[in-house]
Image (spheres, helix red, strand yellow):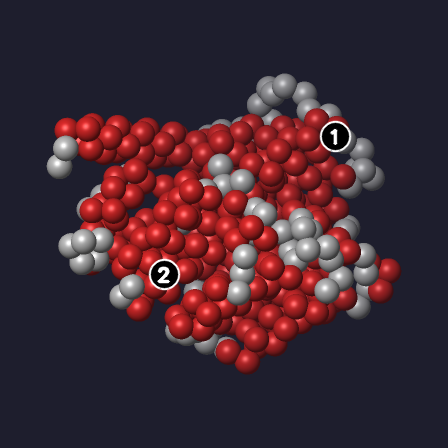
Amino acid sequence: MRRRDLYSLAGAALAAAALESRVAVTLDHLVGVLLPSASGDRLDEDLAPLTIKKAVTAVTDAKRTYQAGAYPAVLADLPDLLRRLHALSEASDPADKRVHRLSADAYHVAASILLKLGDVALATVAAGRSLSYAHRSGDPVAVAASTRIVVHALMDTGHAEQAHHLASETAQAVLGERTLSTPKTVSVIGALQLRGAVAAAIAENRSVAHQLLDEAQRAAEHVPERGNLRWTGFNATNVQLHRVNIALRLGDAGTAIDLARQINPADVHLAERRASLYLDVAHAYTLWGKWDRAWKALVEAERAAPHEIATRPTARRLVATLAVSAPAHARPHAVRLAQRAGVPL
């Protein structure tokens, strides 16, 4: 290997180690918010005051940064944001429910990132906190939005059957409220149905998975294609992304590839979703033993959202598998990718 390549790999490894260290420190701070009595931290410690207007901006930034795939950046800001939202909730008029909706959204982001990092236990705590604040808001759409992350946490803790039932029941309850049939509501319900479809696939309930996919497809007809209403990223293309993922979960790697070929990556406007698509494609090609194509898909995932590779355990395992199992001609590419992401081999 050339000296320049060695220096490059060493630099990438150091950068990955620094990233891992920063994430670990921030996670310790987040534990102090989610489990204050266990950590000795206080949620009501002195903090810079936060107004509703500033809270809206801060939560919007957290959502946007998460969807851009910049997980360490949003993770670094979350502990203080959650503490300030708690203080704002304590100081606000009980009749003003806006802070509860904002808190539900902020804890949703926390749970989402924790799931990306593979910390399912803490993610479950954050998801429960999100749903609690949503109920306090009295907003059925906020409840449905928070239920989506609870469903995700349930299916990642081995309760996929209960997860898809919860998704279906919540979706039906909100759909029964005809006064709520706005594009935002449809987006939230459609996204919840997609999460339920994934849970059903994990539970190996193929018919329910496809039923929920079809229901989400019909819902997508009523939202704009570039829709990201209520931070769901829900639209017809998003339904197709889930069809790819669910085919893969059901063991249909060939179907997953065929479905992925029908998607124009330029139509996937959120970096986090685009990276997830490429990871699914890489996984499918790995199952086929098509190592070159798997590596190229992983590179595209890295290009879309580098932290999706660097921080997500499932992605890191896929990179490690490729680096170890690929034939000689493809292995150097996979090894370099592993080095950039800090994946030990």
Q: Residue furthest right?
A: 179
Q: Residue 48's quadrant in the figure?
A: top right
Q: Amino acid at mark 1?
A: Ile
Q: Position of residue 326 (x, y in %)?
A: 21, 57
Tell us which disc is closer to us: 1 or 2.
2
Helix, strand or loop under label 1: helix
Q: Position of residue 94 (x, y in %)?
A: 79, 37
Against 215, is 36 above or below? above
Q: Which residue is mark 1?
A: 52
Let me know if residue 86 appears in the view: no
Against 50, is 203 above or below? below
* Left or right side of 242 for 19: left
Viewer-proximal residue among 118 and 194: 194
Q: Amino acid at mark 2?
A: His
Q: Residue 192's quadrant in the figure?
A: bottom right
Q: Position of residue 81 (x, y in %)?
A: 59, 30
Q: Position of residue 328 (x, y in %)?
A: 15, 54
Q: Which residue is mark 2?
A: 283
Helix, strand or loop under label 2: helix
